[in-house]
Protein backbone atom coordinates (compact mmCIF):
# COMPACT_ATOMS: atom_id res chain seq x y z
CA UNK A 1 0.00 0.00 0.00
CA UNK A 2 1.40 3.45 0.76
CA UNK A 3 4.48 1.88 2.34
CA UNK A 4 5.33 0.05 -0.90
CA UNK A 5 4.21 2.71 -3.37
CA UNK A 6 6.93 3.63 -5.86
CA UNK A 7 7.91 7.29 -6.08
CA UNK A 8 7.26 7.73 -9.82
CA UNK A 9 6.08 11.33 -9.83
CA UNK A 10 9.36 12.84 -8.68
CA UNK A 11 10.14 14.26 -12.13
CA UNK A 12 8.46 17.58 -12.91
CA UNK A 13 7.98 16.51 -16.54
CA UNK A 14 6.06 13.35 -15.61
CA UNK A 15 3.86 15.29 -13.18
CA UNK A 16 3.07 17.90 -15.84
CA UNK A 17 2.30 15.19 -18.41
CA UNK A 18 -0.08 13.41 -16.04
CA UNK A 19 -1.85 16.69 -15.31
CA UNK A 20 -2.24 17.37 -19.03
CA UNK A 21 -3.55 13.85 -19.72
CA UNK A 22 -5.97 14.20 -16.81
CA UNK A 23 -7.42 17.43 -18.20
CA UNK A 24 -7.78 15.84 -21.65
CA UNK A 25 -9.66 12.79 -20.38
CA UNK A 26 -11.93 14.93 -18.22
CA UNK A 27 -12.86 17.17 -21.15
CA UNK A 28 -13.90 14.11 -23.16
CA UNK A 29 -16.16 12.79 -20.40
CA UNK A 30 -17.74 16.03 -19.08
CA UNK A 31 -15.80 15.99 -15.82
CA UNK A 32 -14.47 19.23 -14.32
CA UNK A 33 -11.25 19.19 -12.33
CA UNK A 34 -11.54 21.79 -9.57
CA UNK A 35 -8.23 20.98 -7.91
CA UNK A 36 -5.31 18.69 -8.74
CA UNK A 37 -2.00 18.18 -6.97
CA UNK A 38 0.68 15.57 -7.47
CA UNK A 39 2.84 14.14 -4.74
CA UNK A 40 5.81 11.78 -5.14
CA UNK A 41 3.65 8.65 -5.25
CA UNK A 42 0.06 9.74 -5.86
CA UNK A 43 -2.32 12.39 -7.22
CA UNK A 44 -5.10 14.28 -5.47
CA UNK A 45 -8.16 15.31 -7.48
CA UNK A 46 -11.20 17.35 -6.59
CA UNK A 47 -13.66 16.87 -9.42
CA UNK A 48 -17.18 17.82 -10.36
CA UNK A 49 -19.33 15.55 -12.49
CA UNK A 50 -22.91 14.53 -13.14
CA UNK A 51 -24.52 12.35 -10.46
CA UNK A 52 -25.11 9.60 -13.03
CA UNK A 53 -21.38 8.98 -13.50
CA UNK A 54 -19.87 6.72 -10.87
CA UNK A 55 -16.66 7.56 -9.05
CA UNK A 56 -15.19 4.15 -9.84
CA UNK A 57 -15.68 4.78 -13.57
CA UNK A 58 -13.90 8.12 -13.36
CA UNK A 59 -11.01 6.63 -11.38
CA UNK A 60 -10.73 3.77 -13.84
CA UNK A 61 -10.66 6.18 -16.80
CA UNK A 62 -8.01 8.38 -15.20
CA UNK A 63 -5.76 5.52 -14.12
CA UNK A 64 -5.93 3.60 -17.38
CA UNK A 65 -5.47 6.65 -19.62
CA UNK A 66 -2.56 8.19 -17.72
CA UNK A 67 -0.80 4.83 -17.22
CA UNK A 68 -1.08 3.99 -20.90
CA UNK A 69 0.34 7.34 -22.04
CA UNK A 70 3.12 7.56 -19.46
Image (cartoon, rainbow, N blue to C red):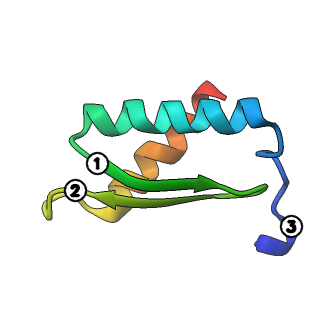
* Secondary structure under the numbered disc 2 in the rendered image: loop
Q: Which label sits in the foreground, 3 or 2? A: 2
Label pair 3/1, CB-CB below 8 angstroms: no
Query: Tag 1 or tag 3, which sits nearer the N-term?
Result: 3
Q: Nearer the viewer, residue 1 or 36?
A: 36
**Which residue is disc 1 drawn over?**
32
Q: Is residue 52 left or right of residue 6?
A: left
Image coordinates for residue 57, horizontal then vertical, percent: 34, 54
> Mark 3 to mark 1: distance in Å?
31 Å
* Secondary structure found at label 3: helix
* Mark 3 burial class by Cα count in 10 Å: few <14, some 14-19, many 20+: few
Please report contact status of discs 2 and 1: CB closer than 8 Å, yes or no: yes
The residue that mark 3 highlights is: 4
Graded by Cα atoms within 10 Å as few (under 14), some (14 to 19) or many (20 or more), the crowding at tag 1 reads some
Tell me which residue sits at (85%, 73%) in the image: 3
Residue holding disc 2: 49
Q: Residues within 10 Å of mark 2 (few under 14, many from 20)?
A: some
Q: Is residue 42 left or right of residue 48?
A: right
Q: Is residue 61 above or below residue 5?
A: above
Q: Position of residue 16 (x, y in %)?
A: 63, 34
Amino acid sequence: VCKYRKKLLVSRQISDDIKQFSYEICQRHSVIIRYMKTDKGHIHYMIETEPTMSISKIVNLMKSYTTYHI
